[in-house]
Image: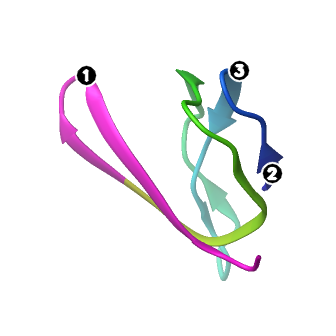
């Protein structure tokens, strides 16, 4: 994922892929607004669902 600008609305599609079997999960549409810039290149993206309507996205930065 490349850097995201501050104060911008984004719509992305998420899905999971199992590398050895190439099984794909059903995709999920996600909309969010950034509060501050996100680094130019991020890696190790981790997405956790903590409630029915809330997920947490965390990552490591290469900047």
The magenta segment is 48-63
Residue at screen point 71% across, 20% down? 8
* Residue picked out by circle 1: 53
Residue at screen point 60% across, 38% down? 36
Tell me the quarter of the image containing the N terminus. bottom right
- Element under disc 2: strand
**Mark-to-mark CA distance, 2 and 3:** 12 Å
Residue at screen point 77% across, 76% down? 63
Mark carried by residue 38: none
Residue 60 in the figure: left or right of residue 55: right
Q: Residue furthest left?
A: 51
- Which marked residue is nearer to the observer: mark 1 or mark 2? 2
Q: Which of pointers 3 and 1 lies earlier in the amino acid sequence?
A: 3
Mark carried by residue 3: 2
Q: Which of pointers 2 and 3 lies earlier in the amino acid sequence?
A: 2
Mark carried by residue 8: 3
> At which x and y percent is residue 44?
59, 75
Residue 38 in the figure: left or right of residue 16: right
């Amino acid at each position: 994922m490349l850097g995201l600008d501050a104060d911008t609305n984004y719509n992305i599609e998420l899905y999971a892929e199992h590398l050895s079997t190439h099984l794909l999960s059903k995709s999920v549409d996600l909309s969010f607004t950034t509060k501050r810039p996100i680094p130019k290149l991020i890696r190790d993206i981790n997405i956790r669902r903590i409630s029915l309507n809330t997920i947490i996205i965390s990552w490591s930065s290469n900047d």
